[in-house]
Amino acid sequence: MSGPDGSVITAAALREWRLDQPSGGKSSRGRIAILGGSPSTPGAVMLAGLAALRVGAGVLALGVAEQVAAAVAAAVPEASVQGLSFTADDGAVTTLTSRADALVVGPGIDDSSAAESVMKAVLAQVEDDTSLVVDAFALGVLPGMAGVDRLGGRAVLTPNPAEAARLLRVDDVDDRESAEVAGEIAKQYGCVVSFESSVAAPDGQAWSVPVGHPGLGTSGSGDVLAGAIGGLLARGADPAQAACWGTYLHAVSGDRLAARVGRLGFLARELVQELPLVIVETEA
């Protein structure tokens, strides 16, 4: 993994770590699939998917609970949609994983058994050259899961504090610095980790993102982050670059909304709208 000199991610630093600029049609910008969306929370998958498109991914597929698949397909005309049964032998998971350059697993899953079934199916079937983001309930089932080593070197984990504690098998991480927590998870799982304002790689590289504020702690915000990182992976970024860029874009999008809407009260869907504008400003 490589990255900008120093450990602080700024626009100037990211201009030295530019994203590839694909040419050609939508397939040249990568295919991404988002798997999650329990019947009561399909919006998480929709937010993640739209975030992936807004950072430049070319082709979007969504996997959601069978009961809501038709409604999601109507709500997100930019995506193909598969219904998930949340079982270990789910054929829809096979279809989604076989066609994707990047996967985001977990947004909107609200049951640990469903998360375990989907994650086991993904680990068993994912292609060797597919990148992944693991988020939400899918993170909580990773400790001790067979095949988790298949994530090493190609996945980004995006835990919140409760999920970070589960990954480390501790009661909480509230009294620890985010960089320390991210670094420990990265080393233990062999994956890049985006945790709060810190990004860590398993080889010891670490970055901090000195932007963002508590207004980002709003419903659906983490789904936007996971989708943005996934979209950058689909475009061809490696896990460290995707995590650093995605974490920065998410945080600066929040800053822009705080200035316009207020420090509290902006919505996750509004973060999605800001992402391409922040990319343009960062790359200028």
Image (spheres, rainbow, N blue to C red):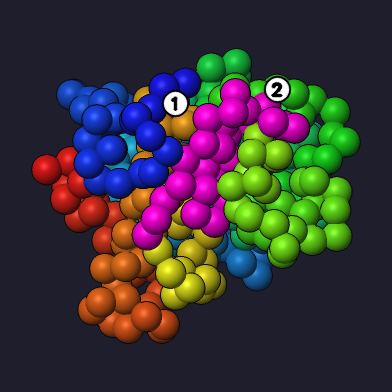
The answer to whether residue 111 of the structure is visible from this angle is: no
* SS of the residue under disc 2: helix
Task: Name the residue: 75% across, 24% down.
Answer: 149
Task: Name the residue: 20% across, 55% down.
Answer: 277
Q: Is residue 203 left or right of residue 10?
A: right
Q: Is residue 256 above or below residue 180?
A: below
What amino acid is labelled 1 in the image?
Asp
- Give the x, y percent position of residue 111: 78, 59
Q: Quadrant of residue 6?
A: top left
Q: Is label 2 in contact with label 1 (beta carbons under 8 Å)?
A: no
Considering only order in the chain, which callout, 1 or 2, is on the residue closer to the N terminus?
2
Q: Which residue is mark 2?
A: 150
Marks 2 and 1, Cα distance to the nearest angstrom? Answer: 16 Å
Task: Name the residue: 41% across, 83% down.
Answer: 265
Q: Which residue is mark 1?
A: 238
Confirm whether the magenta stretch covers residue 105. Answer: no
In this picture, which residue range is highlighted in magenta?
A: 187-211
